[in-house]
Amino acid sequence: MYKVSEFSNMTGLSKETMRYYADIGLLEPVYIDPHNKYRYYDNNSYLVARLLVYLRRFNFTIQEMLAVVNDESFDNLERLIREKKRNLEAEVTRLQGIIEEMDDFFELGIGDEQND
């Protein structure tokens, strides 16, 4: 088993994030020492923690992460990740359109007065 500090270093999750995840039932310690209240995690916890790191990077909300973790079969995980990917691709397209509008704006010569 791993203490919080060691587990934090292994997973990339901050101690505060781990405490928050434990509070909401997303990543609970496998053992809490009744005497000193130290929290411990195991190898299964590590796999869940790494999954959570990826889900956060993939822009999953806490509620979506809870749904994934509570679905022990992970049946919906691929579908959810593909949906997130489509949403990100749409956002990239939207942002690219804004960048093109900015380029068009500058091609009109607006803003050149400030460069004189």
Image: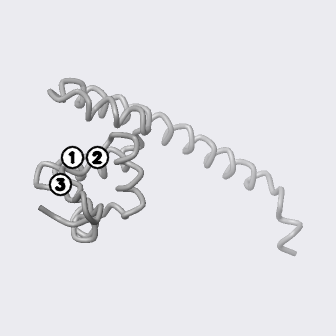
Figure quadrant of residue 15? bottom left
Residue 48, label in figure: 1
> Eyeballing the image, is 99 above or below 84?
below
Q: Which residue is mark 2?
A: 27
Tell me how far mark 3 sits from mark 1, CA to CA: 5 Å
Left or right, 78 with respect to 24, comes to: left
Q: Position of residue 97 (x, y in %)?
A: 59, 40
Q: Are marks 3 and 1 in contact (CB under 8 Å)?
A: yes
User: Viewer-proximal residue, 43 or 105?
Assistant: 43
Q: Which of the 4 image quadrants contains residue 14?
A: bottom left
Residue closer to the observer: 114 or 55: 55
Residue beneath the point at 32% across and 41% down? 26
Quarter the C terminus occupies: bottom right
CB atoms of marks 1 and 2 within 8 Å: yes
Name the amino acid type tagged 1.
Val
| Mark drawn on residue 104 | none
CA separation in Å, label 2 and label 3:
10 Å
**Please, what secondary structure does the residue beneath circle 1 have?**
helix
The residue furthest bottom is 116
Residue at the image position 67 percent from the left and 52 percent from the top: 103
Name the residue tied to disc 3: 46
Which residue extends farthest front?
A: 35
- Label 3: which secondary element: helix
